[in-house]
Amino acid sequence: MFLTEDRIKPEIVVEVTVIALCNKIITLDLKHTDGIVLLGVASLLVGLAVGYFVLRFYKADKKLSANEQNTESLDDLSKAG
């Protein structure tokens, strides 16, 4: 987390933003809201969801490639020894 790594994770920022947007959607008065506003809120939510999954898959892919490199280097060491 932030206290141990001194780094803010972008996934957490996107999660908090999605929660705030969902709170806005729940409290939104649909009778007095234009359709274009609803489309804008929907597009924001879809964009944030896509961004969140891109961040998560990028992070997972980065970990996977690092693990593959470590495995390959261990295989090379075991063959040499």
Image: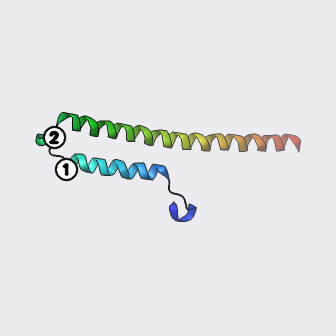
Q: How is the image coloured?
A: rainbow
For the residue marked with disc 2, what is the amino acid?
A: Thr
Q: Which mark is residue 18?
A: none
Foreground of the two, 35 or 48: 35
Residue 46 at x, y percent in the picture: 35, 37
Q: Which residue is mark 2?
A: 33
Residue 11 at x, y percent in the picture: 46, 49
Quadrant in the picture for residue 79: top right
Secondary structure category for the residue under label 1: helix
Q: Which residue is mark 1?
A: 27
Q: How many marks?
A: 2
Direction left: furthest residue: 31
For the residue marked with disc 1, what is the amino acid?
A: Thr
Instruction: State the residue at coordinates (25%, 34%).
Output: 39
Residue 32 at x, y percent in the picture: 12, 42
Instruction: State the residue at coordinates (78%, 41%).
Output: 75
Q: Is residue 58 left or right of residue 22?
A: right
Secondary structure category for the residue under label 2: loop
Quarter of the image with the C terminus is: top right
Q: Is residue 17 left or right of residue 33?
A: right
Instruction: State the residue at coordinates (55%, 62%).
Output: 6
Q: Is residue 15 left or right of residue 22?
A: right
Which of the two marks, 1 or 2, is nearer to us in this view?
2
Residue 12 at x, y percent in the picture: 44, 52
The alpha-carbon separation of the residues under discs 1 and 2 comes to: 12 Å
Circle 1 crowding by C-alpha within 10 Å: few under 14, some 14–19, many from 20 = few
Instruction: State the residue at coordinates (23%, 45%).
Output: 25
Circle 2 crowding by C-alpha within 10 Å: few under 14, some 14–19, many from 20 = few
Quadrant in the picture for residue 48: top left
Foreground of the two, 48 or 33: 33
The disc, 1 or 2, on the residue closer to the chain's N-terminal end is: 1
